[in-house]
Image (cartoon, helix red, strand yellow):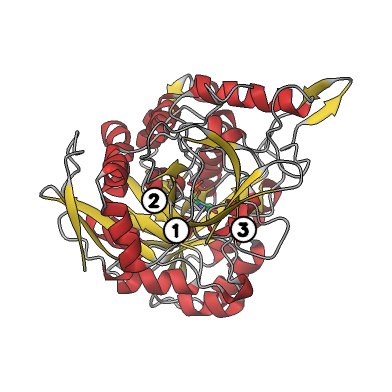
Amino acid sequence: MTAAVPPGLPAKMHPLVRAFLAAPGVVRDAIDGFGSPAHLVFPQVFAENLARLRAPLAARVPGYRICYAHKVNQSRAFVRTAAAAGVGIDVASAAELHGALSDGFDPALIEVTGPKGEEFLRALIGTRVTINVDNAWELERIAALADAREPVPVLLRVCGFPGTPVSRFGMPLHTVHAALEVLAASRDRIEFRGFAFHLDSGEPAERVRAVDTCLALTERAYDHGLTPSVLNIGGGFRQVFTDDVAAFDAYVHALRESLLGRGEPMTWGGNTFGFHLDDGAVHGTPVFHKYANTVAADTMLTDLLDTELEAHGGRGIAQLVGENMLELWLEPGKALVDHAGITVARVEFVKETSDGSTLVNLDLSRDAVTPADQEVMVDPILVTAEGADPVAAGVFLAGRLCLERDLITNHKVWLPRRPVPGDLIAFPNTGAYHMDLSAARASMHPLPPKVAVTHRDGTFQVCRDVEFESGPIPRPRPGIDGARRHEVH
Ligand SMILES: Cc1ncc(COP(=O)(O)O)c(C=O)c1O
């Protein structure tokens, strides 16, 4: 492999984020002000994503509710932006609930999902938040604890749809009859709002089957004298990470070749990323396949709403939802924060290993930019990339922990030149789970600070995430690269 045209995984980036990274001195000032590493969130991009998901819903169904799935990021700026936009929120812990309430959410717009223990359930009774019930025990506890003076709104999360892998979440279909009996018997204390599901996969066909099943369950609920008014189709609307799918494919091809010993080595520590080698060929699907997606979340949603269901005379899902007078609820997480977060870290030193690899050591650990230890297939950006006649350098990025496995990239990345200590490296699109899902405080390293970046009147403004005040958020203008320096509060 020659270094002339190195393989690359160019990231799709929002113009606002691109402008922020390109504005002279702006990133360095932010890092000098808040410390390295740092997570930066862009509430304006969040607001734009929200508008994009709202559009197909507003055009197709009479009633809908978007519940921002808070678990995707702990950012307060995102929660406040969602509150200001008037959408709902899906919280999955007492702390998330507390955050949503203190950031201005009306309890009637809060939905609690995920498995809940006795203490949390007790705390929810009488608060008017909708409980998305995960299992029969939860339902029985709610029935026992609820009071007719403040009936508890609930959704039933169901699972086990035809052709869908078994899930630990939700109530299997064969248990729904018993659940409906409990609901019918507790009508004075429990307000049954409807059925919900959240699939672990973003596969459109699986979602269609789940919708189909939930529509049939809705009919069954009527037979029990219940009056469901909601169909909640969960989250799982995908992100688009790559800016160039041909480059992505070429990178994966070069990676496969390297696993067969052809061309330049591209993996650290014998990693095969889910591929397996057999008879001189590479087989299987790589663990990082989601980074190749090119279908935007709003397109996925539009396609779903327009899908015609054979069992319903070929009528579309949106039409059926309307005819059944159901409100369509969604719980998008990653689709709302797509392109709305980056992480910046500083290069500490660069070293060679015994096999000739170059390791660029950062003041960051893998878990701060990697969800559930998945390999992230998006090129990091050398923020300070200037320098005369740069020569691309193929490197692995290493973390700061005393762990062999603390490699931020187990695949080789090509940077425009060999970094030097003090350089800044930005990781694009880390807002969805990458920042917060797995980050630990090993070796007592503090978690990176979170910083909110907005662009107003040609200026980047940077403040602590917890201090972000939503106010009216100006939409980022296209072509904002002439931005002036930011103000740090
Ligand atoms: C119940 C529920 N709803 C919504 C979401 C958000 O999913 P996504 O970020 O894929 O949209 C999750 C994520 O785990 C979830 O568990």
Task: Identify whether 236 is placed above or below 168.
Answer: above
Which circle, 2 or 3, is nearer the viewer? 2
Quick one: label 2 or label 3, which is nearer the N terminus?
3
Residue 247 at what x, y percent from top left? Answer: 52, 23
Q: Secondary structure at mark 1?
A: loop
On-image quarter of the N terminus: top right
Question: Any mark on residue 73, and which?
Answer: 1
Quarter of the rendering containing residue 468? bottom left
Amino acid at dot 3: Ala
Which residue is most to the right? Answer: 279
Q: Residue at x 29, y 42 (%)?
A: 22
Task: Identify whether 132 is placed above or below 221.
Answer: below
- Residue identified by numbered label 3: 179
Is disc 1 in contact with disc 2, using a CB cutoff of under 8 Å?
yes
Q: Nearer the viewer, residue 121 or 445?
A: 445
Is disc 3 in contact with disc 1, using a CB cutoff of under 8 Å?
no
Is 455 situated left or right of 373 in this image? left
Is 201 situated left or right of 340 in this image? right
Question: Any mark on residue 341, and which?
Answer: 2
Which circle, 3 or 1, is nearer the viewer? 1
Q: Residues within 10 Å of mark 2 (few under 14, many from 20)?
A: many
